[in-house]
Image (cartoon, grey):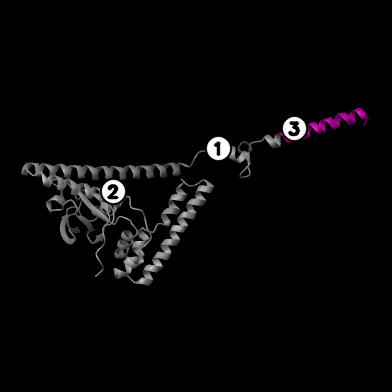
Amino acid sequence: MNRQSQFALSLVVVASLAVGALTFFSEDPAETGGVAEPGTPAAREASARSPAGTVEDYAARIRELADAVEREKEERLSLAAEVASLKNELARVQASGGTRQVAHASASHAAAARDKVDGARARRRGLDVDALVVAGFDEATVREFKEDADQRELDRLYLRDIASREGWLNSQRFREETEALRVDGPSTRDEYGDEFYDWMLYTTGHQNRVEVADVMGGSAAADVGVQPGDYVISYDGQRIFSPSDLRDATVGGEVGELTPVEIIRNGRRTRLMIPRGPLGVRVDLAAAEPQRPG
């Protein structure tokens, strides 16, 4: 091979190497089927082009927002019931010609409204071990529960930190793993019992009572004398701690059969027999010190 042929062949080899290098550095892993190294510009660019989440993530987020809307509706209904109650009280006082009573009634309702808002916004606090021991629960059991609750809270903090760092904070996985670490969940009731669960909710600043905010005219609740301010404690023997507990309890059994419902009114328990089905009440969440066991 003469010198000119060797020189031409060298140029071809160099050009081929240059083209290969350009191709290597310019290829998009998403287009070639490869996977970019995490943290590289190519990986960040591919992440920016990828969808924000899966269909399940969007569906879960929609459900979460829908639940928030429902809670907002319940709060609005509670406020509307409070306004209606104030109007009725004012009308009664005006009809009797009273003036000092108006101020007293308005102040009482305003104080009650403030108490409800303060209770709803109360900061969560750690378990009050002494309060549960005084209430009659075994100290070793209470301390064991507190250790478990503290560890779950730490695990929740670390879970949130990891999810935030790795980009799956708003995912279904995060919601499911967070739910599994809840202290105020069904597993606590199953393991420690309703009475312990009641005191746990109360001493940690959670709401533990379903309060009747308003009674609908002509309803089953109205027929048996349920009144605003009553706490619904149990339905057919099942303890009630939330509006969802009450809704779930009313749909079982035979429609119309007489069912025992326990309420607390002015600190005293009362047992009513109510036809199974919708009670016809508007309810709110509240916090109240449980009655001591035994």
Q: Main secondary structure of the magenta part?
A: helix
Query: What residue does disc 2 label?
Result: 117
Query: What residue does disc 3 label?
Result: 19
Q: Quadrant of residue 137?
A: bottom left
* Vertical order, 2 against 247 (above or below): above
**Residue plotted at (26% across, 51% down):** 115
Task: Look at discs 2 and 1 and give the one toward the viewer.
Answer: 2
- Relative placement, left or right, of 214 versus 196 is left
Q: Quadrant of residue 55?
A: top left
Amino acid type, callout 3 = Val
Which stretch appears magenta? 1-22
Task: Look at discs 2 and 3 and give the one toward the viewer.
Answer: 2
**Residue plotted at (53% across, 48% down):** 165
Q: Are marks 2 and 1 in contact (CB under 8 Å)?
A: no
Query: What residue does disc 1 label?
Result: 48
Looking at marks 2 and 1 on the same chain, the residue that comes earlier in the sequence is marked by 1
Give the CA separation, mark 2 to mark 3.
Answer: 70 Å
Say which of 163 and 276 sits in front. 163
Mark sitting on residue 216: none
Give the CA separation, mark 1 to mark 3.
Answer: 28 Å
Magenta run includes residue 195? no
Looking at marks 2 and 3 on the same chain, the residue that comes earlier in the sequence is marked by 3
Quadrant in the picture for the N terminus: top right
Query: Residue 40: x and y, percent?
Result: 63, 42
Q: Are marks 1 and 3 in contact (CB under 8 Å)?
A: no
